[in-house]
Amino acid sequence: MEIQDLNQEIRSKYFKRMEDQTPHSFSASWSGEDLLYSGIGNAIYVILPTPGCAWALSKSGGCTMCSYIADSPLKNIPSEELVDIFRKELARFSIQPKTVVKIFVSGSFLNPEEIHAEARDKILTILNDIEAVEEVVVESRPEYVNREVLEDCCRHIPDKIFEISMGLESSSDEIKKNRINKGFLNEEFERAVLLIKELKNDYKITSKAYLFVKPILTSEKEAIEDAVTSAQYAEKVGVDRISFCPATIHKGTLMELLWRRGSYQPPWIWSIMEIIRRTRKSLKIPIIMDTSGFGSRRGPYNCKKCNKKLKSSIIRSNLDQSIPEEFECKCKYKWEADLDYSHISRSNVNITDRIS
Ligand code: SF4
Ligand SMILES: [Zn+2]
């Protein structure tokens, strides 16, 4: 498959440029305000080093927009060392009541090849023992979501809401296969969500879908429609929350290659506003819009006059789940032109240059 060959070629060049660093240098943590199931609270984000996402390291080369393996030391980390790194990152914060801890492993927390069961269980036990922690969120591809692993996790974190976030990206199997190279279809995602739903009888377990906004080879208009349809689908399947991830250009990806050659552009922030408006009106579950990279050269972009204002209004609306107020700026007519014509001209970049 051509897309996988290209992916692999790009990855291998990138791997060669990576330097040998210690596992600890790949970990990071930060905190901020966030929306929990019980309302507004605090979030602590921890990135842990792992051998890397198994899908990205396979012959497939991984997803076309993702560079997370560049954040991984690409070697096995002994469980004891990983737990020690986790403790040190967590110790940086004074944990306030109403806290969610989000663990990012640049891959699948539930894949024992990426995070050994021993380390996984210890990390969950540490979090279960902290009273102020209300929720713990991890990420996984759906193929690692099975009864045995979930029950094992839940037994180690019985007192907290334990959420499995899965990168569905799009409800279109065609988009997942040919534009994202996701490596699984809706069927696999549905199986995983249904299993989590079944386990709700015994544990405080929930599921979340990540949806990607504007994959490669996708026009502005199609990106909006796909995002809205995918959110409706995910709610119908039974996820408890949705998190949209608008495209930003990661280094060492097929998306970056197309962007450099003028064949791809991240979405307008106007499109993001439209997605929020339409999904918050039609869905009942919480919807979060990730704003990282907004207003930067590699991220969603409008114009210098309105980028910051819109980003702040989206961040506010994530916390209270409101629909952001109508907003006008001169750059809006360019976005409207893109919406009207980019799918006709079959272009994935803007017809007009963006205002700088
Ligand atoms: S998006 Fe997730 S599954 Fe895809 S390559 Fe990145 S870490 Fe792996
Ligand atoms: Zn503007």
Image: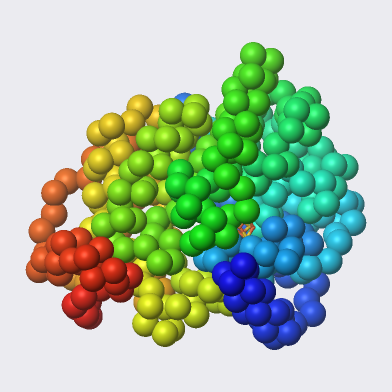
| Percent of width and height locating residue 108 | 70, 49
Left or right for 144, reference 327? right
* Image quadrant in which you'd find residue 21: bottom right
| Percent of width and height locating residue 147 | 75, 28
Q: What residue is at 21 percent from the left and 75 percent from the top?
A: 351
| Percent of width and height locating residue 46 | 64, 53
- Which color scheme did the rendering employ for the protein? rainbow
Q: What residue is at 51 percent from the left and 41 percent from the top?
A: 209
The foreground one among 43 and 55 is: 55
In this rendering, does residue 342 appear at all? yes
Say above or below: 54 vs 120.
Answer: below
* Image quadrant in which you'd find residue 118: top right
Q: What residue is at 54 percent from the left and 56 percent from the top?
A: 177
The foreground one among 179 and 86 is: 179
Say above or below: 136 vs 261.
Answer: above
In this rendering, does residue 94 appear at all? no
Which quarter of the figure is the N terminus placed in?
A: bottom right
| Percent of width and height locating residue 258 | 45, 78
Q: Residue furthest top?
A: 201
Q: Residue furthest front?
A: 1
Q: What residue is at 52 percent from the left and 65 percent from the top?
A: 65
Left or right for 189, reference 276? right
The foreground one among 267 and 31 is: 267
Left or right for 152, reference 17? right
Which quarter of the figure is the C terminus placed in?
A: bottom left
Say above or below: 132 vs 342.
Answer: above
